[in-house]
Amino acid sequence: MDVTISSRGVRISPDLEGVVIEKVARLDRLLAGLDRAEVHFFEEKNPRIPDKDICEIHVEGHGHTLHCKAAGPDELTAVERTIHKAERGLRKLKTKEKNRLHHTGGRHDKHQEAGAIVIPDATDIDFVSEKQIVNEPMSAIEAVQQMETIGHDFFLFTNSENGQASVVYRRKAGAYGLLEHTETVT
């Protein structure tokens, strides 16, 4: 990885420069393919700010861009804090990339061939549980409350507004859905 160090109003010692190059170069182990990093130092001039030394790191490569900034009482502390933020950001990018590449279903999996749908024979179906419920007419809101009370992801009920069988269900995003039975019109 190509590391460039610059500063504005701050003198960078050769020792600090060596530490910065070493620490920034280790970022490549978190996410492969990083091409270059720019490290910039400057000093805050406001006397009321205790952490005057500021370090910014801008990392690019493999289609990713990461920018981190942190302050500290001295340059080395600022570098440590910025590296910590950069590591956290690169781990997050790596996790996103891994999840995107290894996603096994849903709309992101466009190139995967659809498998044949297997419909089981009537002799192959074995029910492990059967329940009978007494279902009094209720509103959809009451049905959601009942569903949450029993801890299921769906609830079959008779809708008090139209007298038809309906189902409320919990969606993946946390919202609720409502399925209502209607007669087909031909």
Image (spheres, rainbow, N blue to C red):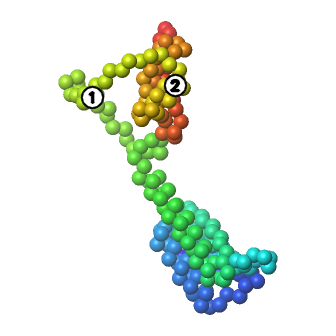
Residue extending farthest bottom: 14
Relative placement, left or right, of 86 versus 181 is right
Horizontal and vertical percent position of residue 108: 47, 45
Which residue appears at 45% of the width and 32% of the height? 149
Q: Residues within 10 Å of mark 1 (few under 14, many from 20)?
A: few
Numbered circle sitting on residue 176: none
The amino acid at mark 2 is Glu
Residue extending farthest right: 46
The residue tagged with tag 1: helix, strand or loop? Answer: loop
Which residue appears at 70% of the width and 77% of the height? 51
Numbered circle sitting on residue 129: 1
Which residue appears at 56% of the width and 61% of the height? 63
Q: Which residue is mark 2?
A: 142
Q: Is residue 67 visible?
A: yes
Residue 48, compared with residue 172, is above or below; it is below
Residue extending farthest top: 186
Question: Residue 3: which quarter of the image?
Answer: bottom right
Total count of labels: 2
Q: CA distance from mark 1 to mark 2?
A: 25 Å
Horizontal and vertical percent position of residue 79: 61, 78
Closer to the camera, 93 or 114?
93
The amino acid at mark 1 is Ser
Kindly report which numbered mark, 1 or 2, lies closer to the viewer in this rendering: 2
Residue extending farthest left: 123
Residue 175, compared with residue 91, is above or below; it is above
Closer to the camera, 166 or 62?
166
Going from the N terminus, do you reach mark 1 or mark 2 first? Answer: 1
Horizontal and vertical percent position of residue 98: 45, 57
